[in-house]
Amino acid sequence: MSVRQADGAMSDLCHADPSGRRAAFALPDGKGGFNLTCTSGAEGKCVLFGYRPWETREGVPMRDLLQACIHLLRADYGGDDHPSTRNGTLVNLHDRFGIQDPGAAAGMEFEAAWGPEGAICVAHPRIADNITLEQLAERYPRLKGRLGPEACNEEAMRADSRALIFNQSVVTDRTAR
């Protein structure tokens, strides 16, 4: 897909995704229309992972998993559109429904559990230079008591029905834990 710039020049609508494609697809907006989303963006990646917002799985609207996945990929811990990751940062994600399987994640540790409103808990920040656990506690009071590896682990979060998706990432700064 291409778009015409103000100066008349044509350019790609989308950046290249991890496979090198510059593709977009229509995504229902929930209001009877649709939006275009690029496969290189968090929303497009999450739909391609299997979180299709028009489906329901085990009584859970997939729209909720799509939102949780978008927050996860962006490291938008507060769910308030304040991402704290960097493009190209690797994460390993899986969910409680088996849509995404955890697979092997050498060198990665449990980072967080995610729901449609953002992180349910955070064991370690993905990019410690961008945000610390202390800053998360200050910025998002609902996360107090749910920060750090002692308070946030996958086993405990599997018992919390609000936690829909889990992820692992490389710990970038052991002192930020």
Image: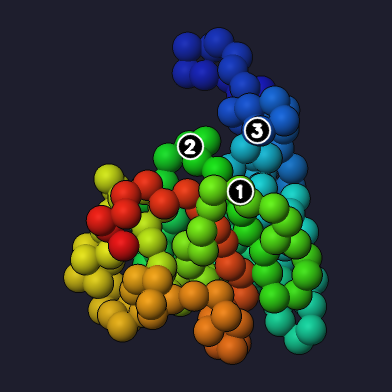
Q: CA distance from mark 2 to mark 3?
A: 11 Å
Q: CA distance from mark 3 to mark 1?
A: 23 Å
Q: Tell me the quarter of the picture where residue 59 sits.
A: bottom right
Q: Which mark is residue 87?
A: 2
Q: Tell me the quarter of the picture where residue 97 sits.
A: bottom right
Tag 3: residue type?
A: Asp
Q: Secondary structure at mark 3?
A: loop
**Picture coordinates of residue 167 (x, y %)?**
56, 61
Left or right, residue 45 beside residue 128: right
Label 3 neighbourhood size at 10 Å, few (<14), some (14-19), many (20+)? some
Q: Tell me the quarter of the picture where residue 125 sits.
A: bottom left
Residue that numbered label 3 is attached to:
17
Could one spot residue 176 in this view of the protein? yes
- Mark 3 or mark 1: which is in front? 1
Tag 1: residue type?
A: Ala
- Mark 1 or mark 2: which is in front? 1
Q: Is residue 2 above or below residue 112?
A: above
Q: Which mark is residue 106?
A: 1
Label 1 neighbourhood size at 10 Å, few (<14), some (14-19), many (20+)? few
Left or right, residue 49 beside residue 40: right
